[in-house]
Amino acid sequence: MKKPVVKIFSIILCAVLALGGMGGIVYALGVSAEAAPAADPAPADSDVQTTAPKTTSSYDPDAERNVKDETVYVLASADGSVQKIIVSDWVKNALGADTIDDVTQLTGIENVKGNETYTLGGNNSCVWDAKGNDIYYQGNIDKELPVSMAVSYTLDGQPINPEALAGKSGRITIRFDYTNNQYEMVSIDGKQEKIYVPFAMLTGLLLDNDVFTNVSVTNGKLMNDGDRTVVAGLAFPGLQDSLGLNRDTLELPDYVEITADVKDFALETTVTIAANELFSDAASGAEGHDGLDELNDLDGKLDELTDAMAQLIDGSSQLYNGLCTLLDSSKELVTGIDQLAAGAAQLKQGAGDLSTGAAQLQAGSAALNQGLNQLAGNNDTLNGGAAQVFQTLLGTANAQLQAAGIQAPELTVENYTQVLDGIIAAAGESPAAQQIAALKTSLDSYNGFYQGLQNYTAGVAQSAAGAGELNQGIGTLKDGADSLSAGAGQLYSGILTMKNSAPALIDGVTQLRDGAMELTNGLKEFDEKGVQKLVDAFGGDLAGLMDRVDALRDVSEHYNTFSGISADMDGQVKFIWRTDAVEAQD
């Protein structure tokens, strides 16, 4: 179920506690200047309207209705006095009707967008030949505004007219005071009370930073882009009285005040917007709401707000304690980082030594590999020469056997031992046997040399191959040692950076701890000066307060036009003041 009353309270509370989100109004300066061209001074003032116009209709409220969107431009002097009022109306022909029955108090009506004509009748009636179109028109009016605005200036504590202020220097105060003239008499608790139309007044200024310095604002916010200071103020004139709130408990803003140091005073035009649309929107869908449910709802929300603040304060205190622990642990961390840095320095030195040794080992391995490859390159020559000598010896032995008349197979490296042993055995103890034995001994001696040479060359070949693999392995070791040395250097650099950053870490944690303490103190102050004041303001006579809020909602709904509106239309109205700039005269 929608809670319009709670929505109204939300608007009020957000305005009092935040005063935020108002920067956009200031940028309406240029827009409003175009929308409301300069005009002649306004006619004499008329009586103040003290009762809001009410509209009734026999139309089905659920049926689509035409809507009048009205903007009232107030051209004012620098002190806020009205010079001219121009009203701009947009009649939204939601029904697409050929004619629109309108009501207006405007004079000098001009269709500003289209060729549609109108016919004036009695009682301010105005019938537009719309032909299905929306109607855009503007005109003038001689009528007291529902809200009046006065702008006052003081220089170094002394009141001064804006005309005399141009070009002056000193401490300046500019104050916007708003007076709500629009109310209805409503019965509250058996008594007739004034309930004012709840206008929200948003005032915006652009201050040149070359002219204005040390700017502060009451009931507003400041934004600075380096060249200019944006001032956005918010006020609710009459709302304090409408709600019957004690100013000692909670004060709703009804003025905006800017203070600054000024040099060669000059002030651009200011813009103020007054609208009750926020409150009217909050009231939408309010029919059939249960006031008691609303009351209980609000009471519960205030209890939730109190509980939430207590939780926030407890949480901020825990945050502070945790940051204190973190600060103590950070000091231990710094000690560990120092030890880590010392170890990383040793690792860096050892990795560098390992890389240097690996480079030396690689150089020696390369030389060994080269020498063994040279030796292995002579293996075939050595083996071939030894084999040739062996064949020559065997050839000589074969020739000696033939000369001795001994018939035997031709001696070879493979069979000479078997053949000669057979001949020796057959010769017995003869001198020939001794000669053959001596020949065999000679051949055996050379064969021993020959086999040794074969083993030697094979070993050289294996050593050369092993030296190649060793050289590759040492190369890999060298690459790994280089990577280790580089990594150790990076590790040391990183740890050294960490070590050098440790004091900043301590400072940062210290600032966080101090900030947490300020947060706790700030939340406590906010609870005491803000939340508890709200609880005190809205937690007492809620029944009476809710009656006022219901009345406030109804009064806001009733006020939907300044210049007049047909009973068959819905409407909304806003007011835009544009004050004259204050400039030095040539």
Image: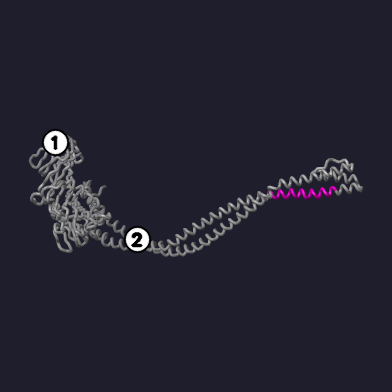
Could you tell me what secondary structure mostly forms the magenta stretch?
A: helix
State which quarter of the image contains the C terminus. Answer: bottom left
Q: Amino acid at mark 2?
A: Ser
Q: Tell me which residue sits at (67%, 49%) in the image.
A: 374
- The disc, 2 or 1, on the residue closer to the chain's N-terminal end is 1
- Mark 1 neighbour density, 10 Å: few (under 14) some (14–19) many (20 or more): some
Q: Which residues are magenta?
A: 439-461
Residue 293 visible from this viewpoint:
no
Q: Amino acid at mark 1?
A: Asp
Nearer to the camera, 234 or 176: 176
Residue 364 on image: x %, y %: 62, 55
Q: Which residue is mark 1?
A: 129
Residue named by callout 2: 316
Position of residue 500 relative to residue 365, above or below, is below
Q: Residues within 10 Å of mark 2 (few under 14, many from 20)?
A: many
Q: Is residue 454 above or below residue 168?
A: above
Q: Marks 2 and 1: which is nearer the front?
A: 1
Q: Please state which of residues 280 and 411 is positioned toward the viewer in this rendering.
A: 411
- Looking at the rendered structure, the secondary structure element under dot 2 is helix
Residue 460: x, y in percent?
A: 69, 50
Determine the CA span between mark 2 and mark 1. Answer: 66 Å
